[in-house]
Amino acid sequence: MATKTRFELKPGMATREAFGKALVELGRENANIVVCDADLSKSTYTSLFAKEFPDRFFECGIAEANMVAIGAGLAASGKIPFVSSFSCFVINKGFEQLRVTAAFPHVNLKVVGTHSGVSIGEDGPSQMSIEDLSLACALPGFTVLSPADETATRVLVRAAAGHSGPVFIRTGRAKAPVVYPTDQRFTIGRAVEVVEGGDVTLFATGLLVAEAIRASEMLEAEGVSARVVDLHTIKPLDREAIARAAAETRALVVCEEHLVDSGLGVRVAQVVTETNPCVIEYVGIRNTYAESGTPDGLLQKYGLVAENVADAARRAIARRRG
């Protein structure tokens, strides 16, 4: 018998907005919190911090590489800097500086990418970041976080501030359904089992957590018990949760708003091959850039909605059965 979901999905704010609000809370508590932005503060919501703490906010202009280096310098001086821009800009334009000035010296820099994935919508492929998780994970010493909703974002931004070392946090433009109650606890590197299940495990991150929950409800109606696990920490992964799911359900689906060639699925597969090899299916973007369109239309077109997750789960179960 499948288990019903613990949380009722309700409309919520975008994770980028939750980030901006969490930043203000942190700023009130700790004078060492400083913020840099790259001429996008209204979009990244760091404008909220700038309004309340103008002396601790640094507008760097359209120069993400320079912004990252400035942030790394602030970290080296004892501050806790958050640098923010669209994910595609801060990761791609700033990658060399992230590597040389943040990862190599292991400074306490917090990098927040907003407008990630294809759900940015009408702005088009030049501003869609579908490689950011893989690039961030490639940086030695970086912790990589991808919250599913406003609650997860608020808690994980706070956790990042208290974490020693460089962190990348992936947030989005689209409003995200509320998955978690306001008192939900999160620990960096520890997955959250959102829905219990024994027939198949749906690993998801970011916006795809809500889609995985919806898929579990579809599968429940068919008598399939689908476990849903939120991998909010992409690096370091919760290896124990992955290995346990592989051993117990023997069929996995990894769901992400990212290229499947290099994202969360690849990292999960590595753990599975090292622990309990089993069937894995993938829901994500396959070897293409997207296009301009509505967020919902793009998620549908590129196979990133609940129906696609449920289909992948059915394939995984069929393959396990042989």
Image: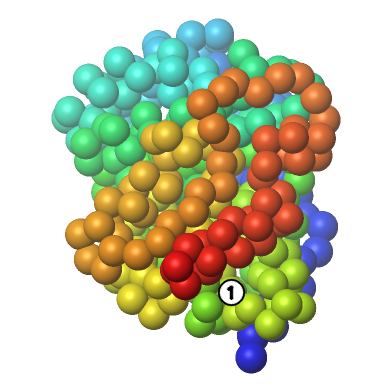
Farthest left residue? 105
Farthest front residue? 322
Farthest bottom residue? 1
Q: Is residue 32 visible?
A: no
Residue 203 pos. (x, y %): 50, 60
Residue 221 pos. (x, y %): 76, 78
**In the image, what residue occupies the spot 82% across and 30% down?**
294
Whether 235 is drawn above or below 99: the answer is below
| Residue 299 found in image quarter | top right
Relative to the observer, which residue lies in front, 252 or 166?
A: 252
Relative to the observer, which residue lies in front, 138 or 244?
A: 244
**In the image, what residue occupies the spot 71% across and 49% down?**
305
Residue 90 located left or right of residue 163: right
Q: Which color mode does the image show? A: rainbow
Q: Which residue does the numbered mark 1 point to in the structure image?
A: 226
| Residue 168 found in image quarter | top left
Q: Quadrant of the N terminus?
A: bottom right
Whether 233 is drawn above or below 93: the answer is below
Residue 257 located left or right of residue 240: right
Q: Is residue 119 visible?
A: yes
The three-letter amino acid code for the residue at tag 1 is Ala
Q: Would you call the spot at circle 1 few (<14 residues within 10 Å), some (14-19), or many (20 or more)?
A: many
Q: Quadrant of the C terminus?
A: bottom left
Whether 130 is drawn above or below 240: the answer is above
**In the image, what residue occupies the spot 47% across and 28% down?**
131
Residue 35 pos. (x, y %): 49, 31
Residue 220 located left or right of residue 170: right
**In the image, what residue occupies the spot 51% across and 49% down?**
282
Relative to the observer, which residue lies in front, 21 or 250?
A: 250
Residue 232 pos. (x, y %): 48, 56
- Element marked by disc 1: strand
Relative to the observer, which residue lies in front, 86 or 317?
A: 317
